[in-house]
Amino acid sequence: MKKSDSIFLVFVVMLSMILAAFAVQPVAAEGPVELQYWLWDSNQLPAYQACAAAFTKANPDITINITQQGWGSYWDGLTIGFASGAAPDVFTDNISKYPEFLNLDLLLDIEPYVTRDSIDTSVYLVDPELWAKDGKRYGLPKDWDTIAVFYNAEMFEAAGIDPAIMETWTWNPEDGGTFQETVAKLTLDNQGRNGLDPDFDKDNVVQWGFVAGAGDPGTGGQTEWSSFAASTGFSLTDGPWTTTFHYDDPRVADTLQWWADLHLVHGFAPGSESLSGADNKAILQAKKAAMTTDGSWQIGNLTTTSTFKVGIGKLPAGPEGVKSPINGLSDAIWAGTQYPEEAWKWVSYLASADCANIVGEYGVVFPAIQSGVDKAIAKHAADGVDVSAFTDEAAAEDGTYLLPMTDHGSEVYNLVAPVLQNIFDGSAKAADVLPELNEQINALF
């Protein structure tokens, strides 16, 4: 969010609190209830519509009206909803947004319900305590995701590259290792020369070996450079609710400079001009790039909507091995809902094995309960898609780490975004600008 967005969010929350003072307080529903439920991922909509149908069948007096909006519109809509008193009763929450909502008292504490109904939080594959603080709880895990490499199998074959290389390939920030060598071999100029050819023309590339932009400032480059930096032993923060960032660590500077130099120096990846109006997935699906990194939530989308065979491979091993961020979502109840009991019934169902199994059968995400994961794996296997790159990373000892979960999320975003973009565009060197950025971030705390 922009700085103005953050200020506006504080304003609208204050306004909603004033309005709430004059509003009718929540009471137990005496008749049929329609709950409003929001999510942002269109790929997941059918799965959760199926969960809603099953829930209403078991709870005939409660119907679920689901609204799906794109990522940006989703969060803007929530802000407006909080201000007007028309926010959804239940909405999908993200770990990067959660602290700000929590600090503004927008989320209902569900710990009393969890205790009353004896919910077994040990069944979740994601730490349920990520959604708890100071003895209160604001969500239950619903899914998890890791990052891997999606690639154009036809381009690999044309380049004579065996995808098995992904089982053993390596990366380092000095020369990129065998990962960069593979990227170079997959990059072609307009004369058909690849990036390993001494006559390769980096200014006239028709096929990039790899595509990824500057990275999401709010998540520390979750689907882009985060895993590469982590594979050097680097950690952006000290864990949930930390008050210290580490953008001044030379390892992240080296990683980000290597990341930018893939296109600035080598021409193996597109720069901002080529990415304008498109994202990594669009470049890959347009057959302009051979590989990208993305999350497991994109498995179904990329393997079913691409006009070529999409393969999935492991991230390259850095100096400290293969590392992937592991993330997950929950469903939050708006503190202003008029139907807290009914909203809790829906949230507890969303976090149950029954819903997890339905979602797993659709194969859009990996649910937070093992039976749902098993069904998702079976669905992908039936479709001929090997998803072991994601599941192996999740299962590996010390193979995953958490994304930043801190206060001041919007302010951190505003500080990091232009710096990352300047590094990516070549107007700044990572080692020169990251220490000052780190001072500015840590001063927020």
Image (tube, rainbow, N blue to C red):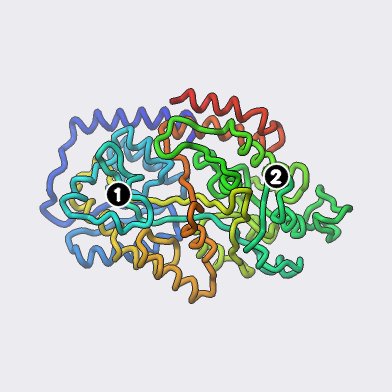
Amino acid residing under circle 2: Gly
Q: Secondary structure at mark 2?
A: loop
Vertical arrangement, residue 440 with respect to residue 298, above or below = above
For this rendering, which residue is in front, 405 or 426? 405
Identity of the residue drawn at 68% across and 47% down? 172
Identity of the residue drawn at 81% across and 47% down? 203
Q: Is residue 297 visible?
A: no
Horizontally, residue 90 falls left or right of residue 159, namely left
Identity of the residue drawn at 29% across and 44% down? 138
- Residue extending farthest bottom: 382
Indicate the quadrant containing the C terminus: top left, top right, bottom left or bottom right.
top left
Q: Disc 2 to disc 1, how far (Cα)?
A: 39 Å
Which numbered dot is residue 428?
Answer: none
Horizontally, residue 417 falls left or right of residue 358, namely right
- N-term-proximal mark, 2 vs 1: 1
Identify residue for label 1.
Answer: 90
Q: Are the residues flagged by discs 2 and 1 in contact, CB closer than 8 Å?
A: no
Q: Secondary structure at mark 1?
A: strand
Identify residue for label 2.
Answer: 271
Picture coordinates of residue 184, whole percent (x, y): 76, 55
Q: Is residue 32 visible?
A: yes
Amino acid residing under circle 1: Val
Horizontally, residue 138 falls left or right of residue 394, namely left
Picture coordinates of residue 8, whole percent (x, y): 40, 30
Count residues near mark 1 (Cα–Cα under 10 Å), then give few for <14, some for 14-19, many for 20+.
Answer: many
Vertical arrangement, residue 343 with respect to residue 53, above or below = above
Picture coordinates of residue 142, whole percent (x, y): 35, 56
- Residue extending farthest left: 30
For this rendering, which residue is in front, 151 or 242? 242
Count residues near mark 2 (Cα–Cα under 10 Å), then give few for <14, some for 14-19, many for 20+.
Answer: many
Q: Quadrant of residue 83?
A: top left
Horizontally, residue 258 falls left or right of residue 333, namely right
